[in-house]
Image: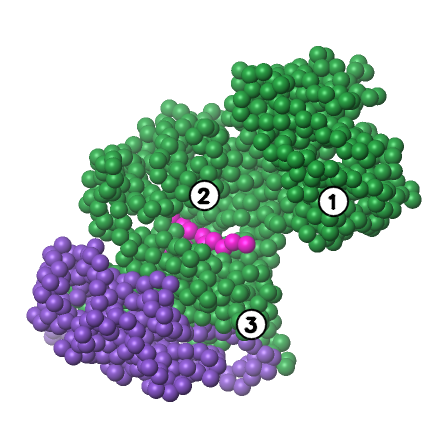
Amino acid sequence: MKQTIIIMCGLLLFCLSLFISSSRAFQSDELLIEEEDLSSEGGFPDLAHIRSSSAQPPTTTTRKRYSESDQDSKIQFSLEHAFGDSEFSPAGIFNARLKTWNHGAQTLTKLRFSRNDFTEVEKEKFQNLLKGDDFYRIRLPSNVLSSPGREYVISSVKARCLPRESLDEHFVIHMEGVNILAVNYGAPGACPHPRQLQLPAKWSFKSHTVLKNSEQAPRAPVFSEDILGETAEGEVVPPPERSFWAKYWMYLIPLGLIVMNAITQAMNMPEEQGGGQAQQPGAAVQRGPTPAVRRR
Amino acid sequence: MAMAIRVFLLSLLFLSFADHSFSLYEDQAGLMDWHQQYIGKVKHAVFHTQKTGKKRVVVSTEENVIASLDLRHGQIFWRRVLGANDAIDGVDIVLGKYVITLSSEGSILRAWSLPDGQMVWESFLQGSKPSKSLLSVPINLTVDKDNVILVFGKGCLHAVSSIDGVVLWKKDFSAESIEAQQIIQPLGNDKIYVVGFVGSSQFDVYQINAKNGELIKHTSAVFPDGFFGEVLSVSSDMLVSLDSTKSILVTINFQNGEISFKKTHISDLFEDHSGIADILPSKLSGVFAVKINTLLVFIRVTAEGVLEVVDKINNAAAVSDALSFSEGQQAFALIEHVDGKVLLTLKCSHDWNNDLLKESVEVGHQRGLVHKVFINNYIRTDRSYGFRALIVMEDHSLLLLQQGATVWSREEGLASIVDVTVSELPVERAGVSVAKVEQNLFEWLKGHILKLKGTLMLASSEDIAAIQGMRLKSSEISKMTRDHNGFRKLLIVLTRAGKLYALHTGDGRVVWSLLLPSLRKSGSCEHPTGLSVYQWQVPHHHAMDENPSVLVVGRCGPNSDASAVLSFVDTYTGEELNSLGLVHSVAQIIPLPFTDSTEQRLHLLIDTDKHAHLYPRTSEAIDIFQREFSNIYWYSVEADNGIIRGHVLNRNCIGEVVDEFCFDSRELWSIVFPSESEKIIATVTRKLNEVVHTQAKVVADQDVTYKYISKNLLFVATATPKASGEIGTATPEEASLVVYLIDTVTGRILHRMAHYGSQGPVHAVFSENWVVYHYFNLRAHRYEMSIIEIYDQSRADNKDVWKLVFGKHNLTSPISLFSRPEVILKSQSYYFTHSVKTIAVTSTAKGITSKQLLIGTIGDQVLALDKRYLDPRRSVNPTQAEKEEGIIPLTDSLPIIPQSYVTHALKVENLRGIVTVPAKLESTTLAFAYGVDLFLTRMAPSRTYDSLTEDFSYALLLITIVVLIAAIFVTWVLSERKELQDKWR
């Protein structure tokens, strides 16, 4: 649960409004038992808004691992991409720290991403994708320790979803320990349906990365007898006080009508009586008999 | 404390008021529902006709049912359904009063009382290694005046007392590595012979004392050519088997402990022999039957072991066991198919040329070949011997033949339904009205007297049945035309035997049935299996003159890479319109949401190589398909591998033959579950034809939330591999269950949630924007049900009325799944007492009516549970506004209200599936539950708010109106008169 909030903190950096709306889903539920906090590093404040200008040479596909301490070790895994049906080729490097917990579990923290810029050939390929409204595909190893693991996890998006000012991309990496279950790749915001052909102003990437672990399901509510008694006896919640109008409108409206009716009648009475004197020949005469009269 | 009790009672009271929407009165049972009982394909049959009284036959079936059937009418006297993995190996009758069954690979022996089916005793037979299980009831073998049942199972021979099931003695053969084939008990002898093979070429005989199980003698001999398959006992000391090449018959004589083999080439016996032989397992005395290609050869064995061919029959189908019917005389039945008829011949074992009986019976061509035959004898009125035969057909139906006619038949194919779909009935045409049955005055009077008796509670049970029958007749539910409310439909069901039935929803009768020719065993298709049924053509524009049709998909063989078979069947006439034997396999069938000009639905068949094949194969279909080509995505689940992949169509297949209806696919996304911690145990999607009325949901305080409604959501549940077995095999610490909601177009994981300390089996149902799933919580030692609801946040801003007025909303903008979804999820878990076999949800025509979950319980009943109980917004103290909305206060467990059992007092034995079909009337839905039994009922989850109930008194309404009008006139006249009088005054 807390992890999700932490992930949401990460989201906060680039999308504050989203945070407000989506964090609403995760509040309440004090029935949850807080699980051991797996990533207390304060989320991923460095969620890699790294331009590809600082990219490393694209040939580092192999994993480099050197341990600083017994607890944490640095780790690398590479992102690969493909244009349409083409073969996958390296596109960037993820750097992270592998944190080993006392109970043996391992999690990734402090994920950094360095994206390679498109080469000229790749630019051309990407433009072809844009023209054909085809898929831009990426893949990650399914295990960060022994790449590629069992198999690569693949994700794709229509190429026309990416270009804005620059090429905006958004990774959600679903982790389970050191395994990558899935990567969800796409535009950080909406991708409106009739996809227009639009070339990016700058051929550089603006990448956002989020790591997600599974959250714990809410437990079934447990009622013991004393809790039940307490809620029944203790806080007898008074119904929220409503305004006078909200409570009695059904009485007030007929009352008002009656009053109005009475007033008009009362106004007509003197008019009828004074009609003979013809002091006011105008409106009162034209108005004719009142409804009360007509009813008879 | 007192307060707590009061609160509890109050909540109980509330709940008892809350949900009576389905309960019905006793006399309403059977009016809107029907229930049919079946037993399945018969494996063994034992007749019990000696005593005076009820003549019966006890059968055991492939659905693990033991049943006692009435021989005169075929009705079920009693029936017991054993568990799913408790297959019956043998059945017999002892002492004339107990039915003995051996099940679970020879480890459970049970005795059932013959008259009423009560279990008398049960004994668990211990053994160490799996082996063939044999049940043998010797006729005259007694130990201490106790009849003995001999059971071989799990590598041990047991002698069990037939009175109380106590194991008298036990002989363990597991050390000897013998594969026992037969238990032979010569008449009038205290010796038992257990014969079997060790390896493939050594033959062993154990001679055992029947009184105490002591081994008397053990002899063995090696047959260097090796044996193939099983041995068949021809007489008390003679066995027949085949050698490993299946071309030599071996007779084995083991008299006096001496084993001698004698080989006979089949080609010696039988001149123009080619191919391989199989020995039929029918026990005939002195004779045995060998099947060579299509030819059946009867071979007699002389006392010296010499074989001689007695007869050759070309189109034989089945042979029964021998039956001894008088002093030393034995007979067996031989079934042949001649000119579409079944020819039943009873042969005398010793006198071949003398046929005891030869009858030709018409059984109807939709039943296929005879698979099994069992015979029984009786004494005719002229004191001669008569025979009756019970035959099991290719479509699993059971027939009793006697005196050249079919006495009764049972459609046992319906006990093994594979898939269900629905077809509309024909529209009622002006000229073709169903003639009204004229009733004479006497009948009419009698009916009314009966009804009067019923209301005065004077009616006997027979009268009540008659009243029910009259009600059924009068209520038009079984007419063969479409009705205004859409209650009358045809259920098209595909059974495991490859037979298609059309059942009328009104009374459940079989309107037509078709044994699909394309799903029958043939040279090109060795083991055909039916997979599923789809609506192929549903004419709306030409409903008057065109018939709807269904598509049946099957494959030739048990593996998924076997080639596929398609068959198109007219649902009004029950005729096969067309059939296709395909070259490719079929792994997935996707009905597309497009139809061509003849209203045939486009279907995409995905084969195991991930090629997509389009049907129907017309140029028009390909035109429609090309238009939507880039919008077709699908996914595949590799459950064993733990991978889910998403695919998109690419281009036409590249192959030797140009096929414009075949398309390559490209992998778009993949989700790889770590194999050491997660294993896929359940995947569920929404029903394709589900209708959602509105996306908006008004919650408390006049607020609106928007449901996230996408047809492309997949619910996946994974469990740790350790905990994917049975409950109790894993500890709470090592078990966990993870559930996923996955968008199948982009592969996005919308939600991922772990239930620690929980495990499967998971049963789930997905509808609208919610998914409900059922699993076991190991920590709480209870079953739980959880709900996840998904709401769309991208549309949440459209609450402002002015935005709607000025059109500044995004409600009509198209949704692209490539956008990042803004969803919120709500979830909650509740305890649920029952374990569950299947879950379904009601579906109505427009989706307005509130939903009920239909839960198939472990007791084979269907429980309707209101969806409101599974609302994630339930809280302990709902506010006033929430109460008005109908939110129920939070409880830790879901209530099980006895009145809400849809099946009321009935059981749907071995419940496997529940199908809901919307009626035209919005409030009503049809629920069809199938297993060994069938059950259909009409349900109204929010009561029938849009129609008057059937017992509504129109007469009372009319009388009231007439009385009111009369009263108006009377008072008018009176007041006129009074006024006149007043004026005159």
| Residue type marked 3 | Pro
Label 2 neighbour load within 10 Å: few <14, some 14-19, many 20+: few
Cβ–Cβ under 8 Å for marks 2 and 1: no
Task: Please state the chain letter of the residue tagged with numbered disc 1 in the rendered image.
Answer: B
Look at the image and tell me whether residue B802 can be seen.
no
- Determine the residue positioned at 62% across, 27% down: B248
Secondary element under disc 1, as helix, strand or loop, is strand
Magenta span includes B840: yes
Magenta segment: B837-850
Q: Residues within 10 Å of mark 1 (few under 14, many from 20)?
A: many
- Picture quarter containing residue B147? top right
Q: Nearer the viewer, residue B655 or B845?
A: B655
* Residue ID for mark 1: B152
Q: Chain of mark 2?
A: B
User: Chain B shown in which color?
Assistant: green
Q: Are marks 2 and 3 in contact (CB under 8 Å)?
A: no
All told, the count of numbered labels is 3
Residue situated in front as seen by the camera: B460 or B126: B126
Majority secondary structure in the magenta region: loop
The colour chain A appears in is purple
Q: Position of residue B560 (x, y in %)?
A: 42, 44
Q: Residue at x 69, y 43 (%)?
A: B198
**Which residue is found at the position 33% from the left and 82% from the top?**
A66
- The numbered disc on residue B559 is 2
Is B704 left or right of B306, judged from the image as shown?
A: left
**Separation of marks 2 and 3 at Cα, in angstroms:** 36 Å
Q: Chain of mark 3?
A: B
